[in-house]
Image: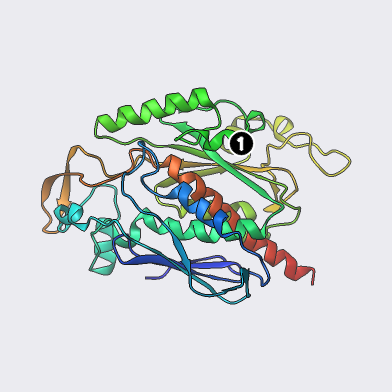
């Protein structure tokens, strides 16, 4: 299987399966001498871990990261940083009913056809549990990018939207509720929606908005390696993501050029920021903001028709512990992937100035 690595200079390679003994990763390219805040890294994992509230999966995993290499006396050495996160609460028997059955909208069918053999226990390598490794790497990247702030939050669940622009939000309130929406009134409605959907044995999707502040001018490369292209790839690599837009996004298609152009101030900033902080694929110093769409979780507790390995249509019903809405736990994942992209481009930029 290819495709297990992300990044060029600041590079993450992950390994492991949902129901194996452990998942883990190797981070290459992290500069030497970075003093790590291990509590901050664990905090990011705690934001993503299962079982943290009654609106997410109740799988109980401590998600404690163990570093194996690349760190000495609390500082990075410049060599590969190896780490593992042990799986402690697998219930593989919950998946025995899909051993010979393909779940609708999962990777079961495509993995089986591509590789001829699949780990059906929780989806194996296709499980979103792999994203815990991204959070570890992203937490280190955040510390490397200490002058840049990264804020992701839930901006919609189903048909419930946070209408306020991000400039009017207090990001310190994002962690004040289970759904991670920085508006308490809207958050309450989102939580009620998720609970209602869960009672139906169903799931619901939503969107995550992310804002990157204090990004320096000049990150990103022309043509194929544009900054927004890499951010899009990063977000679309996350399980359940179905869409990505930055700046004015699809709404910008309804505007005229005279309305959409970001006019300059004398200091190089712009009066508006419909470009979303990126022009020509390169950061311009303004806030970078984007939105990521997450589909409803594919496993539902309702009976559905599906296909089995013998080519017959059969009936199946989801079992086990699953998120009724993945969005709240996706917040730290979105932030982590954004941090990995910025760290990679920061190092690329640095090579030009040596």
**Residue 253 versus residue 318: which sits nearer the camera?**
318
Q: Is residue 343 visible?
A: yes
Residue appearing at x 36%, y 66% in the figure: 22
The quadrant the C terminus occupies is bottom right
Q: Which residue of the protein is positioned furthest toward the bottom in this rendering?
A: 79
Q: Is residue 233 visible?
A: no
Relative to 167, is 48 above or below? below
Relative to 321, is 142 above or below? below
**Would residue 194 be found to the left or right of residue 199 on screen?**
right
Crowdedness of circle 1 by 10 Å Cα count: few (<14), some, many (20+)?
Answer: some
Relative to 105, is 78 above or below? below
**Would residue 105 be found to the left or right of residue 86 on screen?**
left
Residue appearing at x 29%, y 47% in the figure: 105
Residue 298 x %, y %: 30, 44
Residue corresponding to mark 1: 171
Residue appearing at x 80%, y 36% in the figure: 263
Q: Which residue of the protein is positioned furthest toward the front in this rendering?
A: 73
Q: Quadrant of residue 85?
A: bottom left
**Residue 279 versus residue 235: which sits nearer the camera?**
235
Residue 270 x %, y %: 79, 39
Under circle 1, the secondary element is: helix
**Residue 66 versus residue 192: which sits nearer the camera?**
66
Residue 237 x %, y %: 46, 55
Residue appearing at x 47%, y 32% in the figure: 156
Residue 235 x %, y %: 50, 51
Relative to 115, is 330 above or below? above
């Amino acid at each position: 299987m290819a495709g297990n690595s992300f990044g060029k200079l600041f590079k993450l390679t992950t390994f492991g399966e949902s129901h194996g003994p452990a998942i883990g990763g190797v981070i290459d390219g992290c500069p030497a001498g970075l003093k790590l805040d291990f509590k901050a890294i664990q905090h990011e994992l705690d934001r993503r871990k299962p079982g943290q509230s009654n609106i997410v999966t109740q799988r109980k995993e401590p998600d404690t990261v163990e570093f194996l290499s690349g760190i000495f006396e609390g500082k990075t050495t410049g060599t590969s940083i190896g780490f593992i996160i042990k799986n402690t609460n697998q219930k593989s028997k919950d998946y025995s009913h899909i051993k010979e059955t393909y779940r609708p909208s999962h990777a079961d069918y495509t993995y089986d056809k591509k590789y001829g053999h699949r780990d059906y226990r929780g989806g194996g390598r296709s499980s979103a549990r792999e994203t815990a490794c991204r959070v570890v790497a992203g937490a280190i990247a955040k510390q490397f990018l200490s002058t840049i702030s990264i804020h992701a939050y839930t901006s919609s669940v189903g048909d419930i939207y946070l209408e306020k622009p991000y400039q009017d939000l207090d990001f310190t309130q994002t962690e004040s509720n289970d759904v991670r929406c920085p508006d308490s009134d809207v958050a309450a409605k989102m939580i009620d929606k998720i609970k209602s959907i869960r009672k139906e044995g169903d799931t619901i999707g939503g969107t995550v908005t992310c804002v990157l502040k204090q990004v320096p001018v000049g990150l990103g490369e022309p043509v194929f390696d544009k900054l927004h292209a890499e951010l899009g790839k990063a977000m679309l690599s996350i399980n359940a993501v179905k869409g990505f837009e930055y700046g004015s996004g699809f709404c910008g298609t309804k505007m005229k050029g005279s309305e959409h152009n970001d006019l300059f101030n004398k200091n190089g900033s712009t009066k508006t920021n419909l470009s979303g902080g990126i022009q020509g694929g390169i950061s311009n110093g303004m806030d970078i903001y984007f939105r990521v769409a997450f589909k409803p979780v594919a496993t539902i507790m309702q009976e559905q028709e599906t296909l089995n390995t013998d080519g017959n249509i059969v009936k199946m019903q989801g079992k086990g512990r699953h998120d009724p809405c993945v969005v709240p736990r996706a917040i730290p994942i979105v932030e982590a992937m954004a941090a990995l992209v910025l760290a990679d481009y920061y190092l690329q930029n640095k090579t030009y100035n040596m």
